[in-house]
Amino acid sequence: MLKGFKEFIMRGNVVDLAVAVVIGAAFGKIITAVVDGLINPLVAAIFGKPSLSEAMVFYVNDAKFSIGLIAQEALNFLFVAAAVYFFIVYPLNKLAERRRRGQEPEPADDPLTTDQQLLTEIRDALRARP
């Protein structure tokens, strides 16, 4: 039972997921700092309020409705998603693409059928013609 658990934990995708969670949490703090240190003061300068959550508020029968809070969290999500995409996902995709360019495609494991062999021979003969 413990051996199976050890194999599960040491499997590559579990370790990758654990690393991604830790990096994501740390990266989230950076983005939160950018929002709190740059975006919210910009909103304060535009709307005259300390944050977007306090900028768009209305009351109905002493109940406070904060549309700005929803807007601020949506913007925070968009900033985090954009930062993750442009600083992590996009560069890693480009790196993987560069690595794939240098590799030859893997040969097919299935043997060719008679028709496929014949078509391959015809193609090769046509290529060899001047």
Image (cartoon, rainbow, N blue to C red):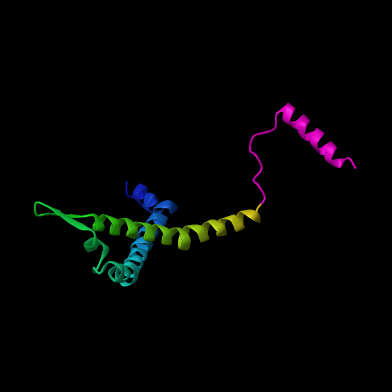
Q: Is residue 114 magenta?
A: yes
Identify which residue is drawn at 70% across, 28% down: 113
Q: Residue at x 33, y 70 (%)?
A: 42
Q: Is residue 32 above or below residue 65?
A: below
Snapshot quadrant of residue 116: top right
Q: Which residues are magenta?
A: 104-130
Give the residue furthest to the left.
61
**Magenta region includes residue 81:** no
Instruction: Tell me the quadrant of the picture where the C terminus can be found.
Output: top right
Q: How many marks?
A: 0
Q: Is residue 115 left or right of residue 75?
A: right
Seen in the picture, residue 79 relative to 107 is either above or below; the reply is below
In front of the other: 22 or 88 = 88
Task: Left or right? Give the position of 109 relative to 49.
Answer: right
Residue 96 lies left or right of residue 48; in this view the side is right
x then y, percent, for residue 110 = 64, 34
> What x and y, as percent, mark residue 117?
75, 31
Q: Residue at x 43, y 52 (%)?
A: 13
Measuring from the top left, give residue 97's x and y in whole percent.
59, 55
